Amino acid sequence: MEGDNNATWYKYRGLQVISKTDISEIASYLVDASNYKGKCEEVIFPENENEIVEIIKRANRTKVAVTISGNGTGLTGGRVPDEGIVIATDKLDKILEINPNEKYAVVQTGVLLSDFKKEIEQKKLYYPPDPTEQNCFIGATVSTNASGSKTFKYGPTRDFVLAMKIVLPTGDTLTLDRGSIKASGHVIKFVSNEGASFEFNLPDYSMPAGKHAAGYFSAENMDLIDLFIGSEGTLGIITEIKLKLLTLPENTLSSVLFFDNESDALSFISAARKISYETREENNNGIDALGLEFFDKNSLEFLREDYPLIPSDTDAAVWFEQEINADNEEILFDKWVGLIEQYNCNIENAWFASNDFERKKFQNFRHAVSWKVNEFLSKTNIRKVGTDTAVPVESFNEYYHLAKKLVSESGLDFISYGHLGNCHLHLNMLPKNDKEFLAAKTLYARICSEAVKRKGTISAEHGIGKIKREYLLDMFGEENIIKMANLKKNIDPNMILSLGNIFDKKYLIK
Ligand SMILES: Cc1cc2nc3c(=O)[nH]c(=O)nc-3n(C[C@H](O)[C@H](O)[C@H](O)COP(=O)(O)OP(=O)(O)OC[C@H]3O[C@@H](n4cnc5c(N)ncnc54)[C@H](O)[C@@H]3O)c2cc1C
């Protein structure tokens, strides 16, 4: 408390913890980047696991709803409370260990991703999960199974979680090492650190094969740790995480390419994706993109003011990166140029980064699109209506053209961009008033259902939170939503934690 001038000591039901109740001090916790707004009685700032345990035990006794907050960059209202109290993880911000020899790090949940990356890079270590917004807490990225531009090569956050400490919704704690507890078929059994036994059925739905972050992870004989990853704060409070690290690549080739025709950009991506998959398996010095990011003409118009060097007659752009070293950089550069030239891209207009500073500029270029959308919408005070859908490779181009046709016909303003290496589309509709907002929502539902029809997902990275529940219901059907709710009830019998995330609270009382 000393040194924290804004906080007041508040006795949360008899417990001495840092807490704020003044609306001017807690207002920022009642919203996230989606613009979804909520309310609560108080925001509590625990400084260690014991305090969280005490808060949760008391909340169980008094049946007070608890919502967990990261840094509020979420795009689905997940950290926004509808009632009760908020546990803010801001003060759990220590990097506990970085082990360069065994290549892992242990962090508290509230460590800022960007700070963590800076710290490990000084030790020549590398953590690939890179959501476009890096101003987020690592625990929250685990809770949402965040992805980013390098997910195409390295997979989502899930693939880097080696172990976790969790405070369960009952106030018991759980320490989970990957591989230590596995389901038998769809039945999972585990014992908390305090000795409480849990046994329940996992939902037996099948999940899309590609990039996917919607609803509970469930698979036959799955690892228990995977249930908590991506569970959006509904099954426990992550307090510590052990993360797998890699060796920092020597260098990275980074380029933004501009195409006169969008179809050439899409064909280029298809070709680069296919070659990357083949090369990765062969493990030779061939094209192997970290990510393939797409920007349509409307996205580029959004960016033009800040990036006047975008060529005027451009219809689409692609940003790609590949790790390189002194031995292969020339070979790889030539291979990429050879590929680029096959798809009517004017190499003279292409941007190539030759140092870290320029590479960061390209990352910012990608980041700027997402920010511009959010900035635009916060001015209109209208919520974002943006897809986070992904579909299997074989359906992607047809799906993209259909989605674009539907939105063009609607007359709504829109921009589309995305992680097309993973066939993952952010088609953002930009409604100017409430009527257009409703039209955008109708269209959004249609575009989601078209993704589901193609065995894709309605959310590949942002999760469901409170604003995408109805689409998850469409994707999995009510029977499976009830299975998710039943699973939660086994872990959270008093139904206090992160209510309203993933499915409506009503499913907990059915
Ligand atoms: C411009 C922009 C670009 C973005 N780009 C990407 C992207 O490329 N990829 C991507 O995946 N996401 C992206 N996001 C979304 C967002 O950054 C991620 O979802 C991120 O993981 C949220 O982190 P946060 O700390 O802000 O969490 P919050 O928004 O505060 O919370 C997110 C969720 O995590 C839960 N949570 C937080 N801490 C814990 C904990 N300790 N234990 C259990 N649950 C917890 C919360 O309850 C909530 O449900 C973007 C957002 C913006 C604004």
Image (tube, grey):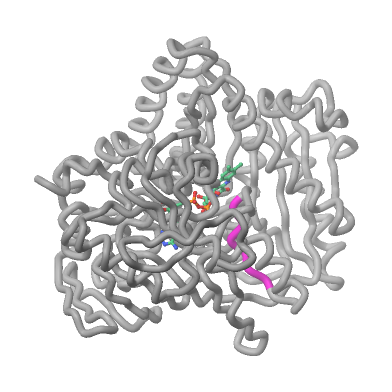
- The residue at the point 50 percent across, 12 percent down is 433
Name, please, the residue furthest toward the left. Answer: 510
Is 388 displayed left or right of 149 in the figure?
Answer: left
What residue appears at the point 32 percent right and 35 percent down from the top-left corner? Answer: 471
Q: Nearer the viewer, residue 258 or 413?
A: 413
Where residue 323 sits: x, y (%)?
74, 64
Of helix, strand and loop, which mostly describes the magenta segment? loop
> Which sits in the foreground, 111 or 386?
111
- Where the C terminus falls, by quadrant? top left
Q: Nearer the viewer, residue 266 or 451?
A: 451
Q: Residue at x 75, y 29 (%)?
A: 303
Residue 82's x, y, as percent?
Answer: 33, 41
Q: Quadrant of the N terminus?
A: bottom right
Q: Is residue 392 above or below residue 51?
A: above
Q: Count the marks.
A: 0
Coordinates of residue 509 in the picture (x, y in percent):
12, 47
Q: Quadrant of residue 369?
A: top right
Q: Judge whether residue 402 can be spotted in this image.
A: yes
Which percent across, then down, holds residue 66? 33, 54
What residue do we see at 69% from left, 77% from top? Answer: 247
Q: Is residue 443 above or below residue 293?
A: above
**Is residue 202 depicted above or below 104 in this figure?**
above
Which image quarter: residue 459? top left
Q: Is residue 101 magenta?
A: no
Whether residue 203 appears in this view of the structure is no
- Residue span colored magenta: 126-131
Q: Is residue 275 above or below residue 121?
A: above
User: Left of 31 or right of it: where is 111?
Assistant: right
